[in-house]
Image (cartoon, grey):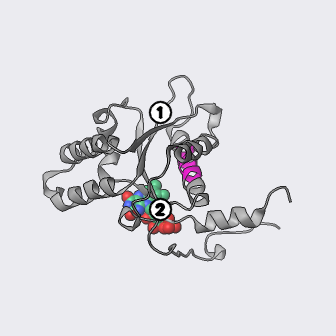
Amino acid sequence: MKYDLSEVTEIIRNRRTIYPEQYTDRVVQKDMVTNILNNAIWAPTHKRTEPWRFKVYSGEGKQKLATILASAYKQLTPADQFNESKLEKLQRRIERTSVIIMMTMKRSEKVTIPEIEEVEAVSCAAQNIMLTATAYGLGSFWSSPKFIYDPRCSELMGYAKEDVVMGFMYLGYPEVAWPKSHRKPLEYVTEWIDG
Ligand SMILES: Cc1cc2nc3c(=O)[nH]c(=O)nc-3n(C[C@H](O)[C@H](O)[C@H](O)COP(=O)(O)O)c2cc1C
């Protein structure tokens, strides 16, 4: 065995979505976030387009995120679905969280691979973020508010139309006991064809 598989398995299986309401006030240090993102960028990437882009919001910077998200929510949510308490919850979550990483996919201009592969690459980077966070004892929460799927969202947030806003990764030290989760047994999702 080249690596300690039990440790890797433990990190993968113990990665948990932990919400901002469950974080302590402890600050996630910048060098930790740098290490986390340095692992993120080692995700696989077809034709090495390296389509991931990150904006890291912390401290006073979080106010900027709160403003951008409030504006996007207001502009992209149909009037009959607009919910002020949802917006307030979003703002409270930003306030409560030490570090939030906005993850976007920068669509390659030169290489012609399907868009989905660039989204997939950023998803792999997101998993690297969450696994590294787990190794640090941090909870993570990949938030994908509905409005990010509006085709107008990228431009509204200052990106090119072809780019994709993939969501917001909240990171924090949990104040709760590390949550448990479950998955269906492997048999439900796997077919073995060996004859
Ligand atoms: C692409 C993606 C988007 C997600 N967006 C949200 C979200 O907007 N709100 C939310 O509560 N959870 C979101 N989640 C987290 C899931 O709810 C969570 O992974 C699931 O409940 C399983 O729990 P676990 O992550 O602890 O295993 C998202 C997960 C993924 C992969």
Q: Which residues are magenta?
A: 120-129
Callout 2 secondary element: loop
The one of 188 and 177 positioned closer to us in this rendering: 177
Q: Amino acid at mark 1?
A: Lys
Q: Residue at x 77, y 63 (%)?
A: 5
Type of amino acid at the residue the image marks with label 2:
Tyr
Q: Quadrant of the N terminus?
A: bottom right
Is the stretch drawn in magenta largely helix, strand or loop? Answer: helix
Of the numbered discs 2 and 1, the one sitting upstream in the chain is: 1
Judged from this view, the residue extending furthest toward the left is 79
Above or below residue 191? Residue 41 is above
Rendered location of residue 195, percent (x, y): 83, 67
* Residue at figure coordinates x 64%, y 41% from the top left: 42
Please determine whether, in this image, residue 114 is positioned above or below residue 24.
above
Residue extending farthest to the front is 26
Task: List the residue tagged with mark 1.
Answer: 106
Q: Nearer the viewer, mark 2 or mark 1?
A: 2
On screen, 66 above or below 195?
Answer: above
The answer to whether the residue bearing label 1 lies less than 8 angstroms from the nearest atom of ligand 1 is no
Q: CA–CA distance between discs 2 and 1?
A: 30 Å
Residue at the image position 58 percent from the left and 48 percent from the top: 124
The quadrant where residue 37 appears? top right
Q: Quadrant of ligand 1?
A: bottom left
Q: Position of residue 140 (x, y in %)?
A: 48, 59
Secondary structure state at the residue bearing disc 1:
loop
Residue 125 inside the magenta-drawn segment: yes
Question: Which residue is rendered at x = 70% and y = 61% of the image?
Answer: 8
Which label was assigned to residue 173? 2
In this rendering, the answer to whether 169 lies above or below 19 is above
**Left or right placement of residue 192 versus residue 177 in this view:** right
- Horizontal and vertical percent for residue 154? 34, 36
In the drawing, what numbered circle is on residue 94?
Answer: none
